[in-house]
């Protein structure tokens, strides 16, 4: 694309995309969002409401007070952290339905999940509904074994899932995977997260395998997968799958306002392998880096292989550049030739209003990953990733020590809670109707604002609005 045509492309208005954002899918606004500001198809994951508040008081792999004990429990519940540090896992935590894993409640530097000797990733949401996971660091490593199954986060056969403000790195399969095996995976959001430094030549049996996100991998008969949102994420230093997307006719996949930085061979790869695939690719920024080869020549590739499976891509307001050491940028095409053939004449329904792609480098770094308002939980690895983006540095790695390894997570005492109801004294003192010396009902709404006390506290910690 020459400079003149790129300027015309860059200045095309987002009017059509914004209009589509307002044409929400039927049913997407019938329930209260999981928290103020929740976005995407997974925004209504609310089955944990009214449940138990369970304290996570141990960094042990399992047992009383562990994250596993809360995440694998049954019934509506909220996991409240009273401890900070790294949890070493010998097997994945299998997250069950109706839970809010509230990582923003962790004191100190937060919670980091890492593998001991294991051949699966640390966190798996399988056959579950209504799951919210926020403000965690998911950084598995190789697990010391040959394995094709080490993702940072796996979501399989699950519905109404919201994953947000996660710091994900050091996976040796995909960093993030949505999988469907003869069932349904739908209504899922990944937002405001960092996906970086997936391991290339590490322990995967296929060899070089540094991957970003795989959406709707499948097995079994009649898989159904769709209504998935990737919003405001930073992908950095993956060989390919930035992201890799398939879908079926149950609903579209939206990829909105993400930054994709420094792939080796490919940015986005969109396939027709499962069924009707509709993708909205809007307001994203794709940037080459030190790892990038000439093979990564466009932001989106469409691979149409199955006759009779329609695939369409709505593309609007994206930017893509080839750069070297933060020197002059040269625009590259957004869509490859097959993608142009499959370009949608009209956008699919979208769940949010995109912002302009040229604002993302300024706005995303402060909000992505496990970072609280004021900078709490932000650690050295995430700062390194953000510096890579800002300075056009870094590269795809084979082992964690090439990126400084796992940061030490600062421990800290939890906030005082004299009545043991898991609402901190300071919060109760500042909210009418609550008493720090009296165990209060966390689901009560004593100030009458329509938000239960515990939800108000979680939103306050996270900076939700």
Image: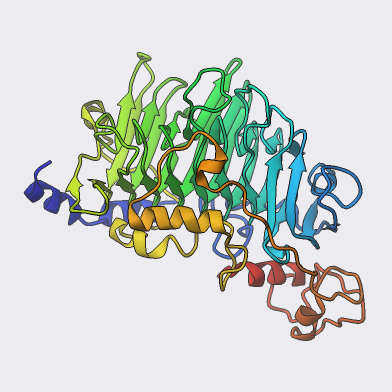
Give 360 or 446, whichever is nearer the viewer.
Answer: 360
Residue 86 coordinates in the image, percent (x, y): 72, 51
Colour setup of the view: rainbow
256 vs 295, left or right, is: right
Q: Please give the name of the residue rendered at 34% of the width and 30% of the height, measured from the top-left corner.
A: 265
The answer to whether residue 109 of the structure is visible from this angle is yes
Give 463 or 247, whichever is nearer the viewer.
Answer: 463
Q: Which picture quadrant has residue 115?
A: top right
Q: Please give the name of the residue rendered at 30% of the width and 43% of the height, measured from the top-left corner.
A: 288
Residue 343 coordinates in the image, percent (x, y): 26, 34
Q: Which picture quadrant has residue 151?
A: top right
The answer to whether residue 232 of the structure is visible from this angle is no
Relative to 185, residue 423 above or below: below
Q: Which picture quadrant has residue 271?
A: top left
Relative to 210, residue 84 above or below: below
Residue 387 coordinates in the image, percent (x, y): 42, 58
């Amino acid at each position: 694309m020459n400079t003149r045509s790129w300027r015309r492309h860059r200045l095309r208005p987002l009017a059509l995309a914004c209009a589509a954002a307002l044409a929400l899918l039927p049913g997407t606004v019938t329930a209260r969002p999981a928290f103020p500001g929740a976005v995407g198809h997974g925004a209504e994951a609310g089955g944990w409401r009214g449940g138990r508040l369970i304290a996570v008081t141990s960094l042990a792999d399992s047992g009383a007070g562990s994250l596993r004990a809360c995440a694998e429990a049954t019934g509506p519940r909220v996991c409240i952290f009273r401890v900070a540090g790294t949890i070493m896992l010998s097997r994945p935590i299998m997250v069950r339905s109706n839970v809010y894993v509230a990582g923003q409640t962790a004191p100190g530097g937060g919670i980091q999940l890492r593998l001991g000797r294991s051949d699966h990733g640390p966190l798996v949401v399988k056959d579950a509904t209504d799951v919210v996971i926020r403000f965690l660091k998911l950084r598995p490593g190789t697990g010391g074994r040959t394995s094709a199954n080490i993702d940072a986060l796996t979501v399989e056969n699950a519905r109404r899932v919201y994953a947000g403000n996660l710091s994900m790195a050091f996976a040796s399969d995909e960093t993030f995977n949505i999988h469907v095996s003869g069932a349904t995976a739908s209504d899922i959001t990944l937002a405001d997260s960092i996906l970086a430094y997936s391991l290339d030549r590490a322990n995967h049996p296929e060899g070089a395998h540094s991957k970003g996100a795989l959406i709707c991998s499948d097995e079994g008969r009649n898989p159904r997968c769709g209504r998935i949102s990737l919003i405001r994420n930073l992908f950095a230093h993956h060989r390919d799958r930035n992201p890799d997307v398939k879908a079926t006719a149950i609903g579209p996949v939206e990829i909105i306002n993400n930054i994709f930085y420094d792939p080796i061979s490919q940015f986005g790869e969109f396939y027709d392998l499962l069924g009707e695939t509709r993708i909205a690719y809007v307001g994203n920024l794709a940037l080459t880096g030190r790892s990038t080869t000439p093979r990564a020549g466009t932001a989106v590739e469409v691979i149409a292989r199955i006759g009779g499976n329609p695939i369409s891509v709505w593309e609007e307001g994206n930017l893509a550049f080839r750069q070297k050491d933060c020197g002059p940028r040269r625009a590259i095409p957004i869509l490859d030739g097959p993608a142009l053939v499959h370009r949608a004449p009209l956008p699919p329904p979208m769940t949010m209003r995109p912002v302009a792609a040229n604002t993302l480098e300024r706005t995303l770094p402060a909000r992505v990953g496990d970072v609280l308002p004021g900078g709490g939980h932000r650690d050295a690895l995430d700062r390194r990733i953000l510096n890579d983006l800002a300075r056009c540095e870094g590269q795809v790695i084979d082992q964690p020590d090439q990126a400084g390894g796992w940061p030490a997570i600062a421990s800290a005492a939890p906030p005082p809670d004299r009545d043991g109801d898991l609402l901190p004294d300071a919060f109760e003192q500042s909210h009418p109707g609550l008493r720090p010396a009296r165990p209060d009902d966390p689901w009560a709404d004593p100030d009458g604002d329509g938000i239960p006390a515990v939800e108000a506290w979680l939103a306050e910690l996270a900076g939700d609005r």
